[in-house]
Amino acid sequence: MEGLLRTISHQNCLNPLITNPKTIHNLPLVQLRVGFINQKLKLGFNGRIYANLSKNDDLVSTRSLEGDDGKAVEKNRDWELEFVGELDHPELGAPKKRKTQQTSRLLEDTEGMDWCLRARKSALKSIVSRGLTKSLENMVNLKKKKRKNKKKLASKNKVNKKGKEGEEDSDYDSEEEFDLEDAMKTTSGDISDLRSKVGMLSGGMFEEEKEKMKEEFVQRLSQFSGPSDRGKEINLNKEIVEAQTAQEVLEITAEMIMAVGKGLSPSPLSPLNIATALHRIAKNMEKVSMMETRRLAFARQKEMSMLVGMAMMALPECSAQGISNISWALSKIGGELLYLSEMDRVAEVALAKVGEFNSQNVANISGAFASMRHAAPDLFSGLSKRASDIIQTFKEQELAQLLWAFASLYEPADPLLESLDNAFKDTNQLRCRLKGERSNFNEESSVEVYQDIAPGEPFSSPVLSFDRDQLGNIAWSYAVLGQLDRAFFSHVWKTMSSFEEQRISEQYREDIMFASQAHLVNRCLKLEYPHLQLSLRADLDERIARAGKTKRFNKKTTSSFQKEVARLLVSTGLEWVREYVVDGYSLDAVLVDKKVALEIDGPTHFSRNTGVPLGHTMLKRRYISAAGWKVVSLSYLAWEELQGGFEQLEYLRRILGDHLGESNTDLV
């Protein structure tokens, strides 16, 4: 019987034993390597022979003469038959269409491939006993539905290829290498992994395409030339200004962005409205004293990123006031941590329009860059020249903010300082008002609305009335810039000194900051400019010094960078003293006998984009040097380039040896 079956399988044909097809569904089914052969057993094939064949051969599956039970058994066993090799693979074609293969002469006299079947059967039993049947079934079973999906996908790809003439062929075959059905079954937790894998396969083309589409969308939303609907623009501006929270402003703007994206034309998102939206978001954050962490989270929202992107596109078409509003808003929302490239863009556009700025614009833009520690030398050079041209129009707070910004970034301001000397030649032109009379800079005036805004007019009187904190800021700025011999500083300092009856309190942060600034300036006058004879009286200096030394304000914190360097300093074999105080300045580590001071400068000592030392750092170095110390600066920028404790220790020995006039070998 087995020989007869092999003969049928080898010849790939049906003999006259095959019966009428109409009755074939009621007959047993014998599964052979060449496919399914339905036979009605005649004279030589009785039921007894068939039963023996089914008992001895696991590859034969039976089907019930009636009902669907046989179908279930057949379906469950299909994967086993395919694994063993008895079930035909649909992709190989029907048996009749398959090309007949010639049998090797070496196998003509053998009994076939029974040894191979037995080996596969043994493997199948092992798989079943180990409980791996489900996994193997998923690997082996044919997915006819997936095959159909692949056919549809292939036909769709052919249509797309016809419509894309001139494009290059894809680097991979999506029908063979990308399983659409499996991708659709991917759980939500695997989505990010799938995207990253697809991105790797495509060489990052999908991520680039996504960014390109986003940029094109922003550009389309930012096409401001052409017709406009002034009524819609005014209504949108009114809604933005009247919004009470930052989130409300963002929702109003985001809704309009989506409407424009869907085809609303002309767009009410004019440069003025975009600048106003950003300004109102920042203003509402200031109103509720929103914490920095919440501001950063707010800034990372998709709608907020879209709004900032549109603002960058709109910058060239913004007015001077719009550029001022955008720069001020970015500094309040992102602080020192965000909008690095955006501020570079603002600097570029602002420099091109610096001739249009008024005093408020100059003060706001310079203050924004300073608060973000973002250096912009070319822009500040232009702002200095512009401020010198309109110096008579500056208000007290604007002037104090402008000088503080130049000093914070340590930007030269010679044209500005020269114009102040020329404009204020008499001490009587400056006054100091009581604290209760102070008038804060009104940010509301920087909001643009759709109405005629009268330009700022010059003061009818040349007299400026500063409060004490503003005078302290101006004095500190001159000290940082090393310009204490300027005439305007002399007027400022004398005005503040004459106000000594003002009580200096140790309970308020504003008083402590003023006292710290005043005490620092007075030390600089004593040490660097004693010939000017502008130092404060001893009793007033003592009162200011006590207020400036309040522990609550001057609490010293040690960074991990300082701790790491301090541990290595011990290895130099030198007697270092940590936190040594010189005239109120706390030095990180000193060699007292050699008068060498090591300053461990972290990120707050440098501009975030250029790495240039900031004003307060330069003032401290200059003062310590004037006091007779050799200052060695250890920057975190150089430290991060070193790898391992050995390189770090060698670097310390080298820079210390340079300042000590000794070779590296002299430092243990």
Image (spheres, grey):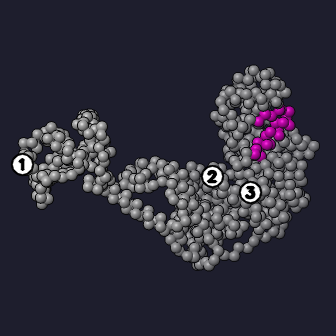
Callout 2: SS: loop
Residue kind at label 3, given as amino acid type: Ser
Q: Is residue 176 visible?
A: yes
How busy is the neighbourhood of tag 3: few (under 14 within 10 Å), some, or many (20 plus)? many
Which numbered marker is on residue 250? none
Q: Position of residue 293 (x, y in %)?
A: 56, 49
In percent of the image, x 73 and y 32: which residue is there? 588
Number of the front mark, 2 or 3: 2
Magenta segment range?
A: 612-633
Q: Earlier in the sequence, mark 2 or mark 1?
A: 1
Residue assigned mark 1? 43
Residue kind at label 1, given as amino acid type: Leu
In percent of the image, x 92 and y 45: which residue is there? 532
Q: CA distance from mark 3 to mark 1?
A: 107 Å
> Residue extending furthest front?
105
Q: Position of residue 415 (x, y in %)?
A: 86, 58
Q: Nearer the viewer, residue 647 or 248?
A: 647
Residue 576, quarter of the rendered image: top right
Callout 3: SS: helix
In percent of the image, x 74 and y 29: which residue is there? 652
Callout 1: SS: loop
Residue kind at label 2, given as amino acid type: Leu
* Apparent side of residue 65 relative to residue 548 in the rendered image (left or right): left
